[in-house]
Amino acid sequence: MKGKRLLMIPGPIEFTDEVLGEMSKPTLSHVDPQFIEEFGQALERMRAVWLAPHGQPFAIAGSGTLAMEFAVANITEPDDNVLIVHTGYFSDRMAEIFRLHGANVDIVPGAVGDLPEVEAVRAQLEAKKYKTLSITHVDTSTGVRADVKHLAAAARETGTLTVVDGVCAVAGEELRMEEWGVDIALTASQKAVGVPPGLALLVANEKALDAFKARRTSVRAYYCDWQYWLPVMQAYEARKSAYFGTPAVNLVRALNVSLGQILTEGMDFRFRRHTLNARAFRAGLSAIGLKYVPVREDLYANTLTAAYYPEGVDAGVLPRIAEEGVVLAGGLYPSIKTKYFRIGHMGMSDTSEILATLGAIERGLAKSGYAFDAGAAVAAAQSLYKKS
Amino acid sequence: MKGKRLLMIPGPIEFTDEVLGEMSKPTLSHVDPQFIEEFGQALERMRAVWLAPHGQPFAIAGSGTLAMEFAVANITEPDDNVLIVHTGYFSDRMAEIFRLHGANVDIVPGAVGDLPEVEAVRAQLEAKKYKTLSITHVDTSTGVRADVKHLAAAARETGTLTVVDGVCAVAGEELRMEEWGVDIALTASQKAVGVPPGLALLVANEKALDAFKARRTSVRAYYCDWQYWLPVMQAYEARKSAYFGTPAVNLVRALNVSLGQILTEGMDFRFRRHTLNARAFRAGLSAIGLKYVPVREDLYANTLTAAYYPEGVDAGVLPRIAEEGVVLAGGLYPSIKTKYFRIGHMGMSDTSEILATLGAIERGLAKSGYAFDAGAAVAAAQSLYKKS
Amino acid sequence: MKGKRLLMIPGPIEFTDEVLGEMSKPTLSHVDPQFIEEFGQALERMRAVWLAPHGQPFAIAGSGTLAMEFAVANITEPDDNVLIVHTGYFSDRMAEIFRLHGANVDIVPGAVGDLPEVEAVRAQLEAKKYKTLSITHVDTSTGVRADVKHLAAAARETGTLTVVDGVCAVAGEELRMEEWGVDIALTASQKAVGVPPGLALLVANEKALDAFKARRTSVRAYYCDWQYWLPVMQAYEARKSAYFGTPAVNLVRALNVSLGQILTEGMDFRFRRHTLNARAFRAGLSAIGLKYVPVREDLYANTLTAAYYPEGVDAGVLPRIAEEGVVLAGGLYPSIKTKYFRIGHMGMSDTSEILATLGAIERGLAKSGYAFDAGAAVAAAQSLYKKS
Amino acid sequence: MKGKRLLMIPGPIEFTDEVLGEMSKPTLSHVDPQFIEEFGQALERMRAVWLAPHGQPFAIAGSGTLAMEFAVANITEPDDNVLIVHTGYFSDRMAEIFRLHGANVDIVPGAVGDLPEVEAVRAQLEAKKYKTLSITHVDTSTGVRADVKHLAAAARETGTLTVVDGVCAVAGEELRMEEWGVDIALTASQKAVGVPPGLALLVANEKALDAFKARRTSVRAYYCDWQYWLPVMQAYEARKSAYFGTPAVNLVRALNVSLGQILTEGMDFRFRRHTLNARAFRAGLSAIGLKYVPVREDLYANTLTAAYYPEGVDAGVLPRIAEEGVVLAGGLYPSIKTKYFRIGHMGMSDTSEILATLGAIERGLAKSGYAFDAGAAVAAAQSLYKKS
């Protein structure tokens, strides 16, 4: 028996003691003045973390999948044209949800581990009138990161709304919602936002709200309908209460604590830290010969790494790495599912966790018969940290 | 300053130390063997608490409102006929959700604080073919409790599905899902189930699943679609994992603990305890002259009490009662909203909490100028307990 | 099964959620700046709670018994004359400890449940030269409370040091250490100070420190020796660290939180609240015919009540009261041990807990066959609260 | 801001989540059947961890210093001859405590970082009749580990009692109390036993108890006197209660949980794991040129390492290492205090923590201007782990 295993999957991640401690506080009434203050503050803090000073934040009980529908359902009407930037499993899911809500969906295709060029997307946006462009910022299935800044610029030029599925990105990858002209950015609590799973989070800007208000048809999903939630979010931010469904009180309080910690760190510092940790982690894996699912360096996400098992090793290495103290995730993208594994490194993940994870991967690979210089991975990461 | 205030609203309620302690445990991976075991066990325990040995349990991240849509969306197709037993605010909401999902909704009306007679419902079921009868077991807005047993029997006789919105009832009010022929019973975690808000819970029987499988149209709400969740729930119960959305790990673990405590108490004992506490609580209020929103004794819920403010008292008494240590809820049903208040007494609420609540109500009413024999309420409750 | 039982014994008591939450925070290094700040603050707050603006506070790992020796050992040398005010079990223990440290001990005797008159103590102090007068503020064994103010005045007049064993009193009973001229007042964390057991707490004034400094002989108990602890306490208060033994970090942090809550309430308000709760509690017991161990009303403690079982009832009632949800303590004073029981009502105990306790006592007594008007105890307490 | 810093000092150490969670459970009465069971079980488990199947365990509120006096006070009478094996700061403290309790103390001297040879100690034991031999198993000040097995054998041969101060050793370093003939072994909770500070722990065998029973004089320290504690420990082990001082309930429950975790790991496995981690850690430090305070390899402790700062580096490196995420301790032994630092690696410390600590030390040293191959320390540790 060892101590606690480190959870280095792409969500749920390791949460801070303060966030976990908040979870077990006796539940307040949803109309208790203290909860009203905390919920209001959490909404204000979302705006700061999303870098969307004029955005409208929403936080409701649900998973990341709900967050996706919570975006799609409100801005989509039958026969709307929607363009999807293909990234992997989660861009496919966005396509499915758009279709269910009545949209005609076109997809700009990309190979596995690759993304369509910004120019190809722009060309398609110019070739046909689309109401919405859907971008998966980081596809949790492949660790591929999209160039949201330039894709959103292309959409803006053609009068198209941009929806960013930021489930594996928000609060970890650089996202400047207002500056970049992103209209909706959504995520789930258990990723880089740093809160146990159970909250769907979304910020919409005025253009997105206008599109919602201009609807000629009803939103098809009752629980997702902004008409019910908008007054609730506005009430809590005005430090009043309003009721549509009972908020997930303990999770909302934990969210407020986590967002406070994120803002104390500062968004710029936080983006740089994620970049540095990701580089150090990859320096380690590369030093022992591993290759990545994303096909080019500019596609590598900073929140997770998807790496192919080396020659002679398969998913059987994961329980060995777990015995060495670190829990990782297997592959998810159907066509290559058995050939790669995924490591999350977001939230408060620090240098210590990066080294520990590389160490456990080394020892697990060694037990699986893979040959390499012992210590090469940890030394390479450490060397990169020293230089930075 | 005093110690902690008692939260005696109709949800969230007071949770046990074990349930709260579970909330702050480091989050496990949703594919961790320990979590798989706990989620599987929680599903099995739901079946036992619902008294539905052959039912299919679902537990997903969301509020009670989502639980309502999670029922409606899957068994409703455009132009289905649905009959609603009117009880108050929450039967109106069920009607709204059914309509959004395409149903033709008829309502058997009831006066405020009253319910349509079983015979009136039966007559309507016989007069027209309905796919579904919707019953709000206890309407949180009025404290009125429906006679689910006989209503469900009437529905069964006419080949109609019965959906029970048990948000303020399941695990508190007697509900024998299988024996009574209820096809779907739903609730939210923060009520008598005893878990902080954030989980939508539902059990469906075979007839309900058959109705789902026989659909000719798609479910309109993606996140609610049983086609995605059914394999997940079945996998966890078989102690495997499957993915659709990340489960709310900490809440699910807390659910498993709470359901374990409920089953240790035993359902029959638990129903009786809720009945006794409710009777003792009303004996107290009656002794100081208060009257109830439900118009007849057989309508009084055991999980919450809705009582009119006495002559000369208004909602201003609630903060005074809170100062005395007990948090209560104001009115909710629009037409009488300012004239009554609501007290939850479910979950682990015990004799001590009943006395403390009556004591605080007495002192609050006295401060608001209401005249009565000091101690009469607490003495009456105590006297009833002594006899039982 | 019911919810949590209320712990109404004379220590450990019910602690606030904030205090308990503090206990499980990851342990800081004893030289961590944050811990240094918190320990320093806790010492400052002790001074405020003891109403001893110029006192020297000490907080060390140990029980209340250690706190007693921590006082005695440092101010006692062989052949010192010490006078003990007899109150019960715990004044006997003080006598034992003084004797072990070499003192010649005289005792002003008192009957069970009674105390020697102040005048009798004064006469003895004038008849013989005593270095120290030892007073047990509230004897946990009998619920008898000494008149510390006037006893200390008598001691001061005769140049005698006053040591107050405040284990069942400090932070609950009125004690104005500096104003009343008390030289040492000690307690343990788990009583009215409101922190789980494990800390011995003591404040000494300059006269006590002078007596220590004037010693001609070594302190006989190493761990108790102020020479080692004084620099440590002074260092932490100066926001530096110093080492003699590792402080009980988690308990010290919980102490700081609890003392903060106490000072937020305010000492005057807190003394009055303890008095009111004690009166209400006794109004309840008296209403159903119970009698007290202390022989006169001016001897009744505000932190605990020691009451005789009524006719026909014995200690077998205690498990019945526990089944009803409230844990009480049996007798402790040898000669009457089986005839009475003890109820603690200190710390954050509020009206709700007083009513709940009286309710459980009523129901337990009824089950034990004692006859009385059901509800009389709770009604009497409630009536007294209403008047106040 | 980063995540949580790792506490790698020689106590308090990092505690498991289960142990910390236990700390915040609502405090039980010290006579509650559940607490009686848990305290009894904890005492039984101490016996198993100490490998003393016939020993008498004691657990009382206090620090490690109290544990030392708790041993000395009971077996020492005026003019007893005591021999101390000199190891550093803590052997000096044992000498002080023995002297205070009346002993004539001789010291077998050792140089800094060294220990007297077993043969030198044996010679002294044969040269003069000693009642007690005192051995500090691991001196927290120097990281020097004594050969308890052979020293105790020498003492047994000469009819001398052996007292082992195991504060930095018990449950980490191999100690087979009964097999090796150790008569008393003591420790404090916050070291390898894995419980927040506040408990003094001791196991005595029959010879030690006989020496206590044969006393002609009183024990000088009241709180330490076994005559009061023996009936308490025996009562709890017999699953009854007895009172001398209120036990530190929350700490005792945490102790029971931690001892359970230790025994689940198994003592042999645990000793080997401590040895391996210590070797890996030193492999890392040696690879970047650091030297140790203990002068020979057989003196290196497995629970902590005391290393000299390299050329050009001083204590200013410690805050830099803390910034890198790991808290270490400075020097303690007066004559070399500013020249070395100390790292604890005991309890549940695992491979991940060893790598993280070495990584932080590397980065801190680099910032302090020390030149070495980046990554050499982490790689050397990793390499050693791979081979083992």
Image (spheres, coloured by chain):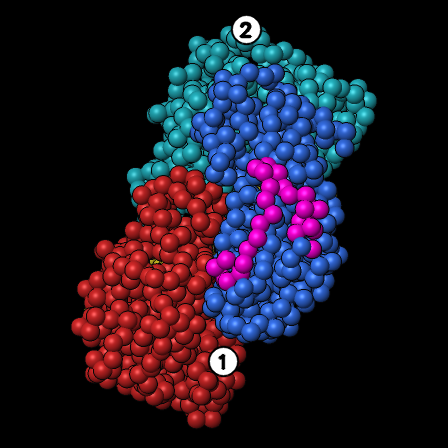
Chain colours: A red, B blue, C cyan, D yellow
Above or below, comparing residue B308 to residue A13 in the picture: above
Provide the residue designation for mark 2: C119
Instruction: Please identify the residue farthest to the front as the structure is shown.
Output: B127
- Count of numbered labels shown in the rendering: 2
* Secondary-structure class at tag 2: helix
Q: Amino acid at mark 2?
A: Glu
Front residue of this view, candidates A84 and C31: A84
Q: Answer whether residue B103 is magenta in the image.
A: yes
Q: Residue A207 appears at what percent x and percent y?
A: 25, 61
Is label 1 in a helix, a strand or a loop? Answer: helix
Alpha-carbon span between mark 1 and mark 2: 81 Å
Pick the residue in front: A188 or D341: A188
Residue C237 coordinates in the image, percent (x, y): 33, 38
Tell me which segment is drawn in magenta.
B99-126
Q: Which mark is residue A318?
A: 1
Residues at badges 1 and 2 in contact (C-beta under 8 Å)?
Answer: no
Q: Residue at x 31, y 43 (%)?
A: A238
Q: Amino acid at mark 1?
A: Leu
